[in-house]
Image (cartoon, rainbow, N blue to C red):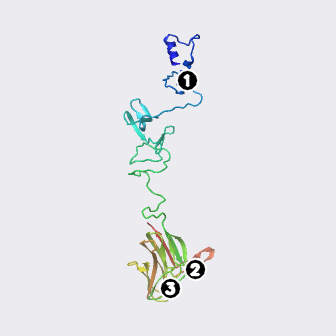
Amino acid sequence: MANVLKQIFSAGVDQIDQTYTIEAWHVSQSVDAFTAAKEYNISISGSLAITGSLFATASHAYSGSKIYIASNNSTNTEYTLVFKNNTGALGSHYELAADGANGPYYNPSINTLTAPIISGSSVQAISLTGSLSGSVVGTASFATSASYALTSSYASNGVSTLAVGAFSDRTTQTITQDTSGSLTFNTTDITDGVTLGVAPNNSRMTITRTGTYNFQFSVQVAASGGGSRTAYLWLAKNGVNQTYTNTGVYLQNANDKHVAAWNFVVNLTAGDYIELFMYANGGNIQALTEVPTPGPGGNGNVGVPSIIATVTQIK
């Protein structure tokens, strides 16, 4: 067919003559061209309307080995997808992965850059819109806007939540003159990482998470009998008295009662236990409880525990 057209137009004819005979071999050329039996160069001028599917076979989708989103200074083209071997003639540009698997991928319709995986030590990008999912590999020198990790307490020792224990006793305990003993508890108010032993070891508060703890207590101390006396209270760890943790509370007569209340900050390892000891000097001393005695209108004494203790992990 190509030869037929050449013959017609070379003769100065601008249209196909009614009397011109088209041979079968002319038609076979067009069949060869459009079935790719032989290679012909076909040029089309004007619009081409295609009905149905269009298939093409190509050995190369692009000649460049790298993909960029770039502005081209030579053509004044703003940020298009460019396939090149290098950045020559490109203005501002952002290189994308060429393997089709590791991204990032730019979506110009919504102006977003999606990055399932970002590999390397640095990635140049003006802005990222949307969510970033998957793993990020490389070195981040600064986290510019994250000031706190809100849900993790301590990453260094693997503690995800801080331990706490709160215990009390609602009985009166008596320490006889010139003796000492550990004060016990009969009520567990809170236990999360700190446990209370059962009798006869219900004076022991055991730690299950290694860390630094604040041990705070209050004891209502009262004289048992007449005359002045002094109550001494201190901390013991794993059955060993802790040096310089002792404090004295002076009771002048039988009607005196005071609240001994202070705290200790101690480093404890999982499995350690702490106790509160009291010594009675000069006469018997009580850790005194008072039962609730409501008064008129609901007012009155709502109850006084003899001992309150809290063990709180602070780091």
Residue 297: quadrant of the picture: bottom right
Q: Is residue 141 left or right of residue 25?
A: left
Between discs 3 and 2, the one toward the N terminus: 3
Q: Amino acid at mark 2?
A: Val
Q: Earlier in the sequence, mark 2 or mark 1?
A: 1
| Discs 1/3, front | 1
Q: Is residue 135 visible?
A: yes
Q: Name the mark nearer the viewer: 2 or 1.
A: 1
Disc 3 marks a residue whose amino acid type is Thr
Asked if disc 1 and disc 3 are in contact, CB closer than 8 Å, the reply is no
Question: For mark 1, what is the residue?
Answer: 31
Image mark for residue 167: none
Question: Which of the 4 image quarters holds residue 180?
Answer: bottom left
Q: Answer few, some or many: residues within 10 Å of disc 1's Cα (few below 14, many 20 plus, some between 14 and 19).
A: some
Who's the residue at 50% across and 17% down the image? 3
Return the residue at label 3.
174
Q: Quadrant of residue 85?
A: top left
From the top left corner, tell me how far across and down residue 188 is, in percent.
54, 74
Q: Nearer the viewer, residue 207 or 146?
A: 207
Q: Residue 264: horizontal and vertical position, in percent?
A: 42, 73
Regarding residue 261, the answer to whether it shows in the image is no
Residue underneath mark 2: 291
Residue ID at (62%, 76%): 296
**For discs 3 and 2, the disc positioned in front in the rendered view:** 3
Residue placed farthest to the left in the image? Answer: 88
